[in-house]
Image (cartoon, coloured by chain):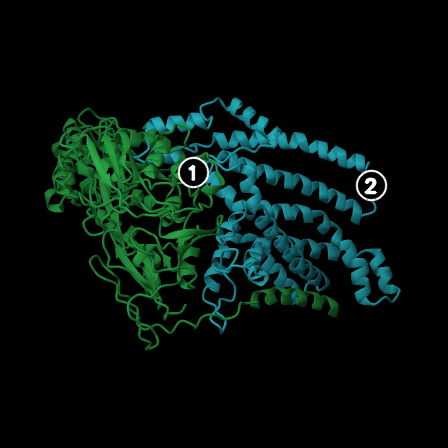
């Protein structure tokens, strides 16, 4: 019997021994929390530099250290021409320098490997960029327009599985090198303004490395030996982590201060948040429910902002093929009947703000709220609008149209999405109060997309978009018969305004914005969507990271300037 | 024995074929497809999507797609991922060691924890410890283990040793930044996912061992052994444990296979880069070649595991004969 007890004890000891086989201590424990209330960095503010625990003087940011980021998904490949997922883009952005970028303050497109801004020919058919001289690949070879043209040719090569080919064909007829440092783009549509952004979206590949390789399938796609970005490739353990290191001394904007950058693959947000707590990762994006707790951690540096290029927003869409929902009064009344503020408070726990148009207010082309028609929560007004339009309340409390059709709609959301489920249920209650009946139905995601995009077998649907940089991409959503126009919205004037806005002479943001404001006004008036809210980006960084002043692009836009305070130990 | 083995191996061929048809049918019956994600990307044109569809052969009728795939399989080619364009076999083999190691560790923990617990409970039937073991194993059997894993992660995230190091790492396969392979570091990362993955195994083993111990204790030969004056540990080890282990040995291979193929969720929770995670990702993205390839490998494991079980059964129980 004693032997049996020993066996049990042995099993337990084995387990505990392994658990206690901790590595030798390398770090000093984190000092106790200095304050209970977090200081959340808001737009325009610079994060307060972290104070070292010891009085050792440091002048300016220090070199060294590795930033440990977290990613919900692993990259597909490090070859940008065959990927379209955000994880791959994130890894690639560390390794390959871009031709252009968005200026963090003005949000204009400016050169990185290219110089300044492009010039246009008088007739608007040609756009010319100058490549900076003296740029080198990490193997010491010169970066010239030969690399840019090689990359363009691969983008246009039908054999290469490039996702966005048609998009580029729509923007450019041809791209050619005038000399080693001048590139001329022939625009498909003269004066096509989004071409400025498009011209820099794909970072050049080193021709001397890839010219004899199959771009779709080659070993270098998983470990590029020659790069041009912040860092060189170091290690990629699939589905575990990716590390780019060391910093490349020849990077166009100067050698990065941090030695390396690592992405850990953490697919579950609970795990990711816990790993931020344990300081295994330097950044987390906690759910609104966890925000207060995580922000108060002694090592947390919370940042809350509305992204200028990637703001996420939710909406309820109408299928305007339904004759009742084709009536603008019905759509406006439904919008006024729903308390969107309550959704911000209860669904997003206050971490969102009202949105009144098809562009989030953080976009450079967003209209001022005052310029837009609004349908704030006002059930009395909603009832009156419906009464005036002839939708009278029937015996069962549901309104009917003049020709006897009841205002009964299906309200769909994708199953498993708790936020959208709450939006649907809250909306159902408010609509009932004004005499509109809805049947809420959850549909599996793929089947849901099928219904929204193809069969149009729904009346109202809860969905969301994540904003892009150029408002011209929304033409696909609001243009007549365009690919993502799920509501069936059509307005020839809006179509014309889109065409004008994409070819404004000179392509100045201010000139283009005036036209996009008109588009937003017309769409807001028509209410093909009920614009619910824009979600706030909630991010916490470890205090050891010295961040940049907050702009619409966040606090890490100039990665080369981010540093790690060596005096703050994990 | 050899004839039996050959017959059993030949029987696996129709099994693999039927499973491949079912899987191919199921995966294609699900709504959506690998190009669905592009429909939400305003930068991808319908022309591009149609071209991808053609390039991937997705515009072909399903039977043709299946026959093409099967033809490639017979030539030893599991195909290429729709997204990474890498050979499926390469991706699977890359993840296989992590999953097998996790499965083996979980099986080992199942033995180390389940067998002693079950035997102890059986020998002390009706005692407080027996009640406690039965109570906790019933609860552990009922609770979803992935949820328990998350709770343990949250719990362990707050427990540090005096050195400031976490008691156990809460995810990943190694400490980031360690250049060389460190067996101790690997073991520390392995223990939590293995223990949680093995929970189902040791609970099952514990319950089996308890009931088998009770049954064997009531046998005449045990009573005879006691009456001969043999020491209790001799009776328990030589007669009770040996006979009670027979069903455990027979279900071991099944448990191991179950742990490997059921590792997907635990690999997800503990960020363990194994085949299960690959399968989950591929299924969500509708990367058909990868998900079919992984399931194919799991099926081979299952078939071989079952075969191993049958062989082991004959080995531990001399009454079994192979004809």
The tag on residue A444 is: none
Say left or right for A161 vs A291.
right
The chain that hosts pointer 1 is: A
The chain that hosts pointer 2 is: B
Please tell me the colour of chain A: green
The extreme right residue here reads B228
- The reply to whether the C-beta atoms of the residues labelled 1 and 2 are less than 8 Å apart is no
Query: How many angstroms separate mark 1 from mark 2 (CA)?
Result: 62 Å
The tag on residue A210 is: 1
Please tell me the colour of chain B: cyan
Say left or right for B189 vs A415.
right
In this rendering, the answer to whether A55 lies above or below B187 is below
| Residue at the image position 65 percent from the left and 32 percent from the top | B15
The quarter of the rendered structure image containing the C terminus of chain B is top right
Instruction: Provide residue B101's location: percent of width, then percent of height.
Output: 61, 52
The image quadrant of residue A423 is top left
The residue where tag 2 is placed is B321
The quarter of the rendered structure image containing the N terminus of chain B is top right
In this rendering, the answer to whether A49 lies above or below B42 is below
| Camera-nearest residue between A565 and B309 | A565
Instruction: Provide residue B81's location: percent of width, then percent of height.
Output: 49, 36
In this rendering, the answer to whether A182 lies above or below A237 is above
| Residue at the image position 61 percent from the left and 49 percent from the top | B100
Mark 2 residue element: loop
**Same chain for the residues under marks 1 and 2 in the image:** no
Disc 1: CA contacts within 10 A as few (<14), some (14-19) or many (>=20): some
The image quadrant of residue A158 is top left
């Amino acid at each position: 019997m004693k032997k049996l007890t020993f066996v049990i004890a042995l099993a337990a000891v084995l387990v505990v021994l392994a658990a206690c086989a901790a590595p030798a201590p390398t770090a000093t424990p984190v000092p106790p929390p200095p304050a209970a209330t977090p200081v959340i960095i808001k737009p325009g503010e610079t994060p307060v530099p972290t104070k070292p625990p010891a009085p050792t003087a440091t002048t300016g940011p220090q070199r060294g250290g590795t930033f440990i980021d977290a990613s919900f998904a692993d990259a597909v490949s490090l070859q940008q021409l065959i990927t379209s997922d955000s994880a791959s883009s994130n890894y690639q952005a560390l390794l390959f320098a871009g031709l252009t970028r968005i200026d963090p303050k003005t949000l204009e497109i400016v050169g990185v490997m290219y110089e300044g801004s492009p010039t246009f020919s008088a007739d608007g058919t040609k756009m010319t960029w100058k490549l900076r001289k003296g740029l080198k690949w990490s193997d010491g070879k010169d970066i010239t327009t030969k690399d840019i043209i090689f990359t363009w040719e691969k983008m246009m090569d039908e054999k290469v599985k490039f996702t966005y080919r048609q998009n580029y064909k729509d923007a450019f007829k041809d791209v050619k090198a005038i000399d080693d440092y001048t590139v001329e783009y022939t625009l498909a549509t003269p004066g096509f303004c989004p071409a400025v952004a498009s011209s820099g979206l794909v970072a050049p590949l080193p021709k001397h490395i890839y010219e004899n390789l199959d771009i779709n399938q080659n070993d270098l796609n998983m470990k590029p030996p020659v790069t041009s970005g912040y860092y060189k490739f170091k290690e990629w353990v699939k589905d575990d982590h990716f590390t780019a290191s060391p910093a490349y001394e020849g990077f166009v904007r100067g050698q990065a201060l941090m030695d390396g950058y690592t992405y850990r693959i953490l697919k579950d947000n609970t795990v990711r948040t816990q790993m931020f707590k344990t300081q295994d990762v330097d950044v987390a994006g906690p759910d609104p429910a966890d925000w207060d707790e995580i922000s108060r951690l002694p090592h947390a540096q919370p940042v809350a902002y509305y992204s200028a290029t990637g703001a996420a927003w939710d909406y309820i869409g109408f299928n305007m093929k339904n004759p009742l929902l084709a009536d603008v009064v019905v759509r406006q009344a439904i919008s006024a009947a729903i308390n969107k503020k309550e959704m911000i408070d209860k669904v997003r726990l206050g971490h969102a703000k009202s949105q009144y148009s098809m562009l989030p207010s953080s976009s450079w082309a967003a209209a001022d709220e005052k310029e837009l028609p609004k349908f704030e929560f006002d059930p009395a007004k909603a009832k009156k609008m419906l009464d005036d339009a002839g939708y009278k309340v029937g015996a069962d409390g549901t309104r009917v149209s003049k020709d006897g059709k009841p205002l009964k709609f299906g309200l769909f959301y994708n199953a498993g999405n708790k936020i959208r489920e709450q939006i649907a249920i809250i909306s159902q209650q408010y609509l009932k109060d004004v005499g509109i009946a809805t049947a809420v139905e959850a549909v599996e995601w793929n089947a849901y997309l099928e219904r929204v995009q193809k069969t149009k077998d729904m009346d109202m649907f809860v969905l969301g978009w994540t904003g892009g940089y150029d408002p011209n991409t929304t033409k696909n959503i609001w243009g007549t018969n365009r690919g993502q126009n799920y509501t069936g919205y059509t307005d020839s004037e809006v179509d014309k305004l889109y065409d004008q806005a994409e070819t404004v002479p000179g392509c100045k943001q201010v000139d283009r914005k005036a036209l996009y404001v008109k588009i937003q006004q017309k769409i807001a008036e028509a209410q093909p969507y009920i614009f619910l809210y824009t979600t706030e980006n909630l991010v916490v960084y470890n205090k050891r990271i010295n961040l940049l002043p907050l702009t619409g692009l966040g606090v890490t836009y100039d990665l080369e300037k981010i540093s790690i305070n060596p005096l703050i130990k994990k | 024995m050899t004839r039996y083995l050959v017959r059993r191996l030949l029987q696996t061929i129709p099994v693999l074929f039927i499973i491949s048809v079912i899987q191919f049918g199921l995966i294609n019956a699900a709504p959506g497809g690998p190009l669905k994600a592009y429909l939400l990307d305003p930068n991808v044109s319908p022309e591009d999507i149609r071209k991808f569809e053609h390039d991937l052969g997705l515009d072909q009728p399903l039977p043709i797609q299946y026959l093409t795939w099967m033809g490639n399989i017979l030539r030893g080619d599991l195909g290429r991922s729709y997204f990474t364009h890498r050979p499926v076999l390469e991706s699977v083999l890359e993840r296989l060691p992590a999953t097998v190691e996790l499965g083996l560790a979980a099986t080992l923990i199942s033995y180390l924890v389940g067998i002693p617990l079950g035997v102890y409970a059986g020998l002390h039937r009706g005692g407080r410890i027996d009640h406690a073991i039965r109570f906790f194993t019933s609860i552990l059997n009922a609770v979803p283990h992935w949820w328990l894993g998350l709770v343990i992660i949250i719990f362990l995230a707050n427990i540090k040793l005096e050195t400031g190091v976490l008691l156990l790492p809460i995810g990943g396969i190694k400490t980031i930044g360690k250049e060389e392979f460190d067996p101790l570091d690997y073991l520390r990362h392995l223990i939590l996912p293995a223990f949680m993955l093995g929970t189902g195994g040791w609970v099952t083993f514990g319950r089996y061992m308890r009931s088998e111990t009770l049954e064997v204790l009531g046998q005449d030969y045990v009573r005879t052994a006691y009456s001969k004056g043999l020491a209790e540990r001799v009776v328990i080890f030589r007669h009770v444990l040996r006979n009670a282990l027979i069903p455990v040995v027979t279900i071991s291979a099944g448990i191991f296979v179950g742990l490997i193929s059921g590792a997907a969720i635990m690999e997800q929770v503990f960020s363990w880069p194994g085949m299960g995670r690959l399968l989950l990702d591929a299924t969500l993205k509708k990367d058909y070649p990868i998900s079919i390839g992984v399931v194919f490998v799991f099926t081979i494991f299952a078939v071989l595991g079952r075969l191993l079980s049958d062989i082991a059964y004959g080995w531990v129980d001399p009454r079994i004969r192979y004809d």
